[in-house]
Amino acid sequence: MKQKATLALFVVTIIWGCTFLWLKQALDTAENYSLGNQTNVVATLFVTLRFGFAIGLFFIFVPSIKKEIGDYRVWNDGAILSLFMLGGFVFQMIGLEGISPAVSAFLTSLYVLFTALILAWFAGKLQSRSLVIGVILATFGAGFIQGPPQLHYDISEWLTILCALMFAGHIIFTDISTKRVSPVGLTFTSITISTLFCFLLFDLFLYFNVGKVDFIGLLQDFDFMFPLLLSSVFGTFGALVLVNIYQKYMSPVRAAILYALEPVWATLFSIAFGMTDFTFWLLLGGSALLVGNLISELGNQSVSE
């Protein structure tokens, strides 16, 4: 089951790597319907609809969903997961206003290290040697894949560090909650609650930018709606169901190291579609991530044997 779980989460990293391109296409399309920079408004609209459409997919593809969400613990744990997830997204989005993508990538990648440190603090000891090496390589690889970050330790950087802490909390709590409640039900409740929070955030941004986005025209544009639907079906519904079903079969630290492959796929897809150029840092960061995953996986297999 551990090998199946590794394959499932590996597929998730590929899907999430694609979501960067889908969001970029949607934001670029939205520029034709916006007055000035309305990234926050459009991004929160995109995420709200992405989560909202995913809710409907449960009723189509999971007939037993009403039974799955009957336990109040599913809603309680779903609320906590949604707070971790949305907290990470919001802190990252606000932080990006004042730092470069390279710095954001590096500081966000600290969630791998934070996951290991938090678990080590609770356990009173560090993880296995192979996982420690994997954590170091994954943090370096994900952080330097867009080039060496230039740190200044200002508020935007500290907010992005909070983002990394939130993502670490999400990984750890996913491990806890999926072992005591229905993984599918948990996915539904966390997405539903996330949709409500995103809608409130969208309303807040819209309040300060009334009349600056042509929403009717935007929602009729194929170049906005198609990447939105792809993100909803695969990036939210499919990916989160796989995460909540399979992550519990490996340690949270191993999962964090695996998730760190996401920026590699995002960068490779960006190169393939002419959005960015191949660099030495991609080769270095990607190689570090690959080696870190191989070491942690081989160490995991030896422990299992």
Image (cartoon, rainbow, N blue to C red):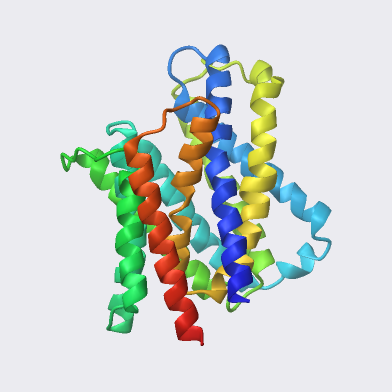
In the rendered image, residue 134, in percent from the top left (x then y), is placed at: 36, 65
In this picture, residue 153 sits left or right of residue 86: left
How many marks do you count on the picture?
Answer: 0
In the rendered image, residue 197, in percent from the top left (x then y), is placed at: 53, 46
Q: Who's the residue at 62% across and 75% down the image?
A: 181
In which quarter of the view is residue 138 placed?
A: bottom left
In which quarter of the view is residue 45 placed?
A: top right
Q: Is residue 302 above or below residue 207?
A: below
Camera-nearest residue between 264 and 103: 264
Q: Who's the residue at 73% across and 69% down the image?
A: 68
Q: Residue furthest bottom?
A: 305
Q: Residue furthest left?
A: 152
In the rendered image, residue 141, in percent from the top left (x then y), is placed at: 34, 51
Camera-nearest residue between 189 and 131: 131
In this picture, residue 71 sits left or right of residue 179: right
Q: Who's the residue at 49% across and 62% down the image?
A: 80
Quadrant of the image for the N terminus? bottom right
Residue 203 seen in the figure = no
Q: Who's the residue at 28% across and 40% down the image?
A: 103
Q: Is residue 298 above or below residue 271?
A: below
Residue 183 seen in the figure = yes
In the rendered image, residue 153, in percent from the top left (x then y), is placed at: 17, 43
Q: Is residue 31 above or below residue 192?
A: above
Q: Is residue 283 above or below residue 241?
A: above
